[in-house]
Amino acid sequence: MEEAEQRHPFLEGLSRHRGAPPTLLVIFGASGDLTARKLVPALYNLALDSLLPADFRLMGFGRKEIPDEQFRTDARASITEFSRRPLEEDVWKDVEGGLYYHQGAYDDPEAYAALAKRIAQMEKEAGHGLQLVFYISTPPGVFEPIVENLGDCGLARHEVKGQTAAKVIIEKPFGHDLASAKQLNEVIVRNFDEGQVYRIDHYLGKETVQNLLVARFANAIFEPIWNREYVDSVQITVAESVGVEGRGGYYDESGALRDMIQNHTMQLLSLIAMEPPVSLAPEGIRDEKVKVLKAVQPLVLHPPEQGDVVRARYKEGLMEGKRVPGYLQEEGIPNDSTTETYAALRLNINNWRWQGVPFYLRSGKRMPRRVSEIAIQFKRPPGILFTGSRRFDVEQNTLVIQVQPDEGMTLLTNSKVPGLETRTQPVKMHFRYATTFGSNTPEAYERLILDAIIGDSTLFIRGDETEASWQLITPVLEAWRDHGQRGLAEYAAGSWGPLESERLLWASGHEWRKAGV
Ligand code: BG6
């Protein structure tokens, strides 16, 4: 145990996680991409740090016929390819023995009856009960039948020593609009209690996102100026350099607003804008996040060219000297697609702290680089001293929180340039995770799976939270659907988005920062 801690200084303080009960994690969608790239490697890394319960088992559930042996071989291959740390034979041996696969159709009650039987047999052989964690990572069309079947076969109410010992983790997308999210919530709470439900937004598992709460509430210097008196605007950028990467079918149904804005960027927004919670208990934090989302004013949509939202899709362009095709040329994208690969929004949070401070959000594919950051731009000082001369280069103070990839925080201030005359120049103070803590940070899924196993729902989305976010986004989706191609701008792959997005900010006297620099 000691050795594991030494290997990983970040995990100090997480020792309470070791008290997790014997657990069986059942992954629905076990042969999917997420399982191979993220879930299995995350579990392996938890095992490597001795953070899994002593009796931990993983069962893949899927339509394909896969013998247990093959499932183990596939798991080993995905660890070898995707784990952040190399496979160690002795740890793998422990992990391997607890891997199983169960074949069945997601809507077939018999498959669930057989699953329940198999679990009962496992418990009998182990001589103790198992907490059941169901991880739903399938295409969204089968979320509801899975939840209903878990309810019908009794596994949703599985008990160990008279206590409910079943949980369900639900991957995104959680609905595709407000009505479908509400319907999914209804199905879930008919079969599970809200306290058993863990809705995933993997951004909440990122170290830098968790650090937002610490940065804001463990420091005394930010909170007094974190409001409309001092903050001029806030910019949240979640940019990706990749295109749709063979996920054309999914992406074209989704688009940037659903895929990134409704969930990931809105989560960043609520953590940045929320009031201090009464405690760090899950409900304290989630209550405050929901309050922020409810205070966001409905977006102005008409006419499409002058509202609070901009949408665009990439056309052919140059990236790192290579020509890359436009969105319509990507595999699986219909010629008459109106799906946006870029969205930018101007939000107004109507509460005492933020009224009048624009929050700008943008996210897009095929941007010049992968970068997620939050920039808090503070108001300018009164312009009486350092203006009116080329000797004074004075910029707005800006606090930039780099979420990824170069995790850290930068504060931009103005300084005197050394010399005999008074000249000013903006300078930056940097804090970098990699420099201070080393670079082998746990992946988001490690933290999230572990939290679900031990029952900490802080980093998961509550039902009312997801509905509040959809409430804001759904009218935009409906308007875009009605507008068809009208108002759908274009940007060259490898650029920072369309001119319309620049105009969105110019209209209120701002401009996008150069993200990631
Ligand atoms: C997913 C989206 O939720 O997040 C993808 O579906 C996107 O389209 C991904 O690429 C980005 O995640 P990360 O962690 O790489 O920023």
Image (tube, rainbow, N blue to C red):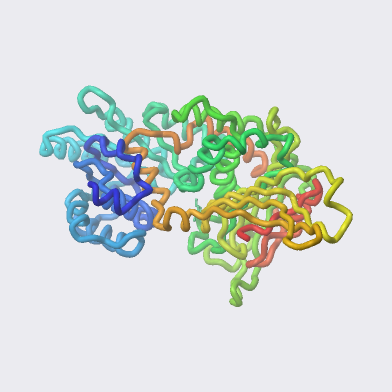
Point 72% across, 35% down: residue = 228
Q: Position of residue 130 (x, y in %)?
A: 21, 35
Q: Quadrant of residue 470?
A: top right
Q: Position of residue 81 (x, y in %)?
A: 34, 64
Q: Is residue 401 left or right of residue 172?
A: right
Among all residues in the image, which is located at the extreme front? 420
Point 64% across, 44% down: residue = 477
User: Is residue 173 something one can see in this rendering?
Assistant: no
Classify 484 as above or below 299: below
Classify 156 as above or below 45: above
User: Is residue 454 something one can see in this rendering?
Assistant: yes
Point 78% across, 45% down: residue = 380
Q: Is residue 354 left or right of residue 292?
A: right
Residue 474 or 24: which is nearer the viewer? 24
Q: Is residue 383 left or right of residue 111?
A: right
Q: Is residue 357 left or right of residue 135?
A: right
Q: Position of residue 34 (x, y in %)?
A: 39, 54
Residue 285 or 479: which is nearer the viewer? 285
Among all residues in the image, which is located at the extreme right? 388
